[in-house]
Image (cartoon, rainbow, N blue to C red):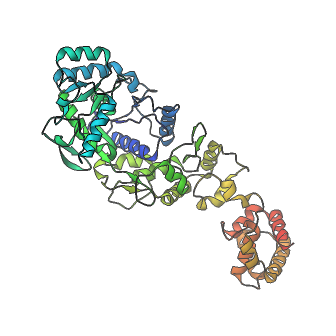
Amino acid sequence: MSDDIRVRFAPSPTGPLHVGGLRAALYNYLHAKKNNGTFILRVEDTDQKREVGGSYEYIEESLRWCGLIPDESPSRGGDFGPYKQSQRKNIYKKHIEALVEKGAAYYAFDKAEDLDMHRKNHEKKGKTFIYNAHNRLKLVNSLSLDKNKVEKLLKRVPYVVRYKMPDNKMVVFKDEIRGKIEVSSRELDDKVLFKSDKMPTYHFANVVDDHMMKITHVIRGEEWLPSLPLHVLLYQSFGWEPPVFAHIPLILKPTGKGKLSKRDGEKFGHPVFPLEWRSGDEKHLGFKEFGILPEALINYMALLGWSKEDTKEIYSLPELMGLFEITSVGKSGAKFDFEKLLWINAQHIQRMSSEEIIKRLSSLNTGKKFNITKEAIDLIKPRVERLADIDIDFGYLFEPQKIDPSLEKKILNDDSKVFLKDYSSMLEKRFEGAPQLKEDLGQCSKIGFGKSMGAMRLCLVGKLAGPDLFELMIFLGKKEVLKRIRSVIA
């Protein structure tokens, strides 16, 4: 493809960026960069009653942290702005008037309570009320009223503009992921395009904006698939060529049933937002604060639903940009597996230098308790799953830890304490390299090498975990090792 590829990520500023939105942004970004195209951030803020302060800034900062920098956006500008829908009212007004003039849309003056009454009457008869060709002439609109009456109502009564859905037309379109789709217009209602507050609905604004901004590919969540027939008809009514559509599957709960939500993150104990989100009394940790690298998050999100021929699982963003194909995204929802994300995060951590890890730790600003050195990172790097809480998870590197009571009772008996006394006496005389420390432990052990190792690990770590025991002893140093052993013996 050519340099003319243009895609957009168009969130509503009604709260923080969810992982589902992040993946949509990522797929748009990858498709654009694979084809030397343009990635646009557009803010769909027409529903201003639901707008949450700080949301746009949060979304922009989240994309920046993940490395998904827009080429055009409200902050960066561009040749096709404004990039906030609330600043494009005159554009929508002009286009809705043109649509009414063509006869493809009409003014509707129905009161909400009257429409509610129609719905209830239909329900009593076991039917579903649909505002369309079947009943629009029985309702209060510019199709059922004479021209003079319409002109008077337009001046004094609130109104909406509805799309005039064709009576019996097969709407045929193609989706890059779903294939060919056919829908009868008889199943569709006359959707509101322009609200009584003179703001466009999502359906109208996104079609107008995508055309005006020369969007070539619309990549978005499958929740918008039912709206696609209307969008295709709107393009046809304007005489515009529609973009290529691709509706990506949902991200499912860890159980595999239902869409992943904010509450699921709280329930299963993992984030669902890229960065920490605060709004009033509401506070949610993000992946960043949880110690997940942006490289790892992007790596994992790309694999959620994307099928590839190889079995490779660890990718950099540039690698993904070269390999990604939107047509290789599957139709089925992808289950969010936090354990898999942690594993991918650990792989990225192991590929980083210890100096870079320390730099990332300092940027977390989570109130670290200890000065974490390169030597400490070198020792534990193969065991680190996430950067947050290193001083908690690996606190034994910095100070003695409480011993697990069940292990203390099981392992630290009289025989093991005799071993610890003998070994500490030997360490007083000779505390050399790891191989010598290992050899000396073997010489002192009369309870078996494994049990001796366990007793020493409890002294130094407080549990049966941690890095190589003898490398840990070298890191802690003679004075600290003897101090911890004697504390246990005492």
Horizontal arrangement in the rendering, residue 247 relative to residue 75 (left or right): left
When the figure is inspected, residue 116 is found, relative to residue 389, above or below; the finding is above
What percent of the width, then of the height, locates residue 337? Answer: 46, 58
User: Is residue 96 among the parts visible in the rendering?
Assistant: yes
When the figure is inspected, residue 96 is found, relative to residue 479, above or below; the finding is above
> Which quadrant of the rendered structure holds the C terminus?
bottom right
Say which residue appears at 62% left-offset and 44% top-offset.
Answer: 364
Q: Quadrant of residue 100?
A: top left
User: Is residue 436 among the parts visible in the rendering?
Assistant: no
Q: Nearer the viewer, residue 344 or 186?
A: 186
Q: Quadrant of residue 146?
A: top left
Say which residue appears at 29% left-offset and 33% top-offset.
Answer: 115
How many numbered markers are drawn? 0
Say which residue appears at 40% left-offset and 41% top-offset.
Answer: 25
What percent of the width, then of the height, locates residue 483? Answer: 84, 65
What percent of the width, then of the height, locates residue 423? Answer: 81, 76
When the figure is inspected, residue 112 is found, relative to residue 387, above or below; the finding is above
When the figure is inspected, residue 305 is found, relative to residue 449, above or below; the finding is above
What percent of the width, then of the height, locates residue 305? Answer: 36, 54
Instruction: Give the farthest residue toward the left.
Output: 168
> Which quadrant of the rendered structure holds the N terminus?
top left
